[in-house]
Image (cartoon, rainbow, N blue to C red):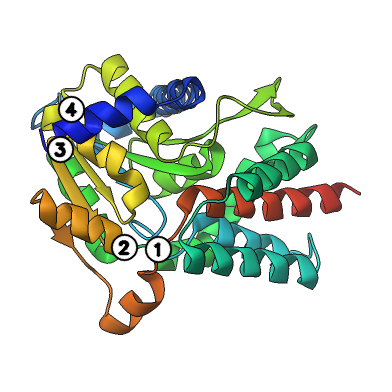
Amino acid sequence: MAALGWLTSRRRSATARSVLAGEASAEAARKSSQDADSQDASDQEAQFPVLGDDRAAAFFDLDNTVMQGAALFHFGRGLYKRKFFETRDLAKFAWQQAWFRLAGVEDPEHMQDARDSALSIVKGHRVAELMSIGEEIYDEYMAERIWPGTRALAQAHLDAGQRVWLVTAAPVEIATVIARRLGLTGALGTVAESIGGVYTGRLVGEPLHGPAKAEAVRALAAAEGLDLSRCAAYSDSHNDIPMLSLVGHPYAINPDAKLRKHARTYDWRLRDYRTARKAAKVGLPAAAGVGAVAGGTAAAIALHRRRR
């Protein structure tokens, strides 16, 4: 397996919160997938015949891998259109996204502040509301931003009878909406604690970012009986090197500079579906986890103000 020594050192550095976040995300993803199967098992069997290696699966990062831009930024646009928050809030969110992309670093204090703010605002709101809004906004802003090339790769895995999962720092509820609309098996995402369908204001573990993504994939593979050496993973970000290093078939899709360099060093496959102009814009280093949390803050502000 590629870069095994590097992966071993990263495994040692994974925090208990990363492991908890990964395991919680895997459990949520499996439950969502099982619920969908029970609702329409016959359609699932017709759409996804098991023809290939049933111990292989594919794991796709979301932002700038499957979808152009950040899913939560598009979600925020949809909320703004519905007048859930004011122009200054959208401008602040856009500025945060730009700063993180240009800096290419993750400031722990900034990330903590954004996470705490988002969690405090969504506390007491219902999960179903986020899901319902996500369905509408997917059609308005996200559907047209799916990369055709990456979508074709995912479909190839499905056509071979393999399961395909999104793996993202975005909330698992939003990620699940996107996965379902793309016809994928399910999604691994950040899990916010809820009791009786109501957010408590706490995360389970930490945002699904970096090492936590790898822990989620590891936990899901163990639960589903997958052989990671026969699985594939796709991402645009060097932050996902832990996840990519887990599988036997890692792909760098629309890679940032650090991932491109790493992929070339370890002879990973490269795919770039951007034009030269778009690559110059979206190929800047990005802190995916921070961007997702900042997006979550914008969404949380919107929900809070709608309730007031």
Relative to 196, residue 149 above or below? below
Q: Which residue is mark 2?
A: 256
Pick the quarter of the image with the N terminus: top left
Q: Which residue is mark 3?
A: 3
Q: Which is in the foreground here, disc 4 or disc 1? A: 1
Q: What residue lies at 27% left-to-right and 16% top-to-bottom? A: 222
Circle 2/circle 3 CB separation < 8 Å: no
Q: Which residue is mark 1?
A: 285
Q: Which is in the foreground here, disc 2 or disc 3? A: 3
Q: Position of residue 230 (x, y in %)?
A: 11, 31
Among numbered discs 3 and 4, the one appearing first in the sequence: 3
Element marked by disc 2: loop
Q: Nearer the viewer, residue 163 or 213?
A: 213
Circle 1/circle 2 CB separation < 8 Å: yes
Q: What residue lies at 54% left-to-right and 62% top-to-bottom? A: 100
Badge 4 crowding class, 10 Å Cα cut-off, few under 14, some 14 to 19, many 20 or more, is: many
Q: Which residue is mark 4?
A: 228
Q: Nearer the viewer, residue 141 or 102?
A: 102
Among numbered discs 4 and 1, the one appearing first in the sequence: 4
Q: Amino acid at mark 1?
A: Pro
Among numbered discs 2 and 3, the one appearing first in the sequence: 3
Q: Position of residue 125 (x, y in %)?
A: 77, 36
